Image: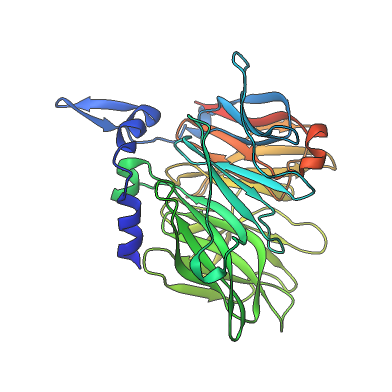
Amino acid sequence: MGDQRRRARRSGRWWLAAVALLVAGCTTVGGTAVIAPYRSPPLGSLASALLRSGAPGVLALSPDGVLVATVDDGRGICLRPLAGGRAPVCVALPITGRHTISAAFSSDGLTLAVGRDVAASGAGAVWLLDTVTGRAQAVPAVKEAGSAPVYLGMVWDHAMAGDDDQAATGADHLLLISNSIQKDGPRTRIVDVDPTSLIPRVVAQATGPYEFQSGYLAAGGPKVIFTVFRGDQLAPNLVVVDLDSGDRKEFGPLGANGTRLIPLAVSPDGRTAVVGSATYQHAGAPRLLDLATGRLTEIPGPTGDFVLASFSPNGAQVAVVSTVGTASSRIAVAPVAGGPARTLVEIPTRPSAAGRLTWSGRDVVGMEAPISPTSAASVVGSIVGWHLSG
């Protein structure tokens, strides 16, 4: 399974190597262009500039901070420049109605994944949109699921240092959770989609016949994690799947009694995750989870209830958005190895806990938020992310 997945990464992606050099920045050594390694901004001098959008219905911010993806009930999905200057590029997709729409950029910014009703209890469809040409293609169903695609979760598996196939080409793959009806009951599968071939490949089992998706999903490097409910317990289990080997590890409920573990982000090397622990009262600050042992440790510094989190591209730092009072949020950056966090800014809004936080190689921290098309016109983008410097 791992060899198949690595071959899928290579297939048709060689042409992205040149693009990746331009997007990531490059240097010249002995006449040969190489990708400059990413370095985290030093916390002592770290600063942030707010990125704002006046457009309504903002779904996601591009990795370079130049574009926002928006949903428009009359025009479909639109790519709009953050600072204006040119007309938006809109693609008509069948997204009308009351279904929730979500979107996420690949780390090279060349592809936008768009999901309609991609939720644990939904019947989701997914499209991949080329951000240069505006062409959109529907992701087909995996063969075992039937004629109509039904996807329950969606997240990009970003290129990581140490993965020669992905790192050399910048070739992200899209990971989906797909339903699967078997003789012993419904199951779900993890599906890997290469944006070039658009062929969905089942790479691992996600849930068994008596387990149910919670809707929380995160990925990094070779690992994808999610929580599942069992019929015989209240708190969910945590599942860790190695995408290269197909190995699946399931932890029982982690944390205090009655705690629902919420996966927020996975480090680029796939060893550590940031998770929240949602209780009946306050969610509390997020913690680091060792994916090999299930050990939870505190992240010194961040306060308030968790909302979103993301690792830096090299995994050395983690950005956390947490709540302040009843209507505000705070973004802080902390070193993963330990040490004090640095609070960057407070904002007079609370991002959707159903969204995601991203941290690109351009040091653009962006927010993704699912939106219902019927309410998109009233959801004005305003603050959509931050540009870090230091």
Q: Is 378 positioned to the left or the right of 4 in the image?
A: right
Residue 205 percent location from the top left of the image:
50, 72
Q: Residue 380, located in which quarter of the rendered image?
A: top right
Residue 129 percent location from the top left of the image:
53, 39
Vertical side of 245 occupied by 8: above or below: above
For the point 65% across and 25% down, the residue is 50
The quarter in which the N terminus is drawn is: bottom left
Q: Residue 39, located in which quarter of the rendered image?
A: top left
Q: Is residue 163 visible?
A: no
Q: Residue 269, located in which quarter of the rendered image?
A: bottom left
Give the tally of numbered discs: 0
For the point 58% across and 43% down, the residue is 104
Of residues 231 and 316, the one drawn nearer to the viewer in this rendering: 231
Vertical side of 219 occupied by 76: above or below: above
Of residues 69 and 314, the one drawn nearer to the viewer in this rendering: 69
Residue 326 percent location from the top left of the image:
85, 43
For the point 41% across and 70% down, the residue is 246
Residue 358 percent location from the top left of the image:
56, 41
Q: Is 221 positioned to the left or the right of 214 in the image?
A: left
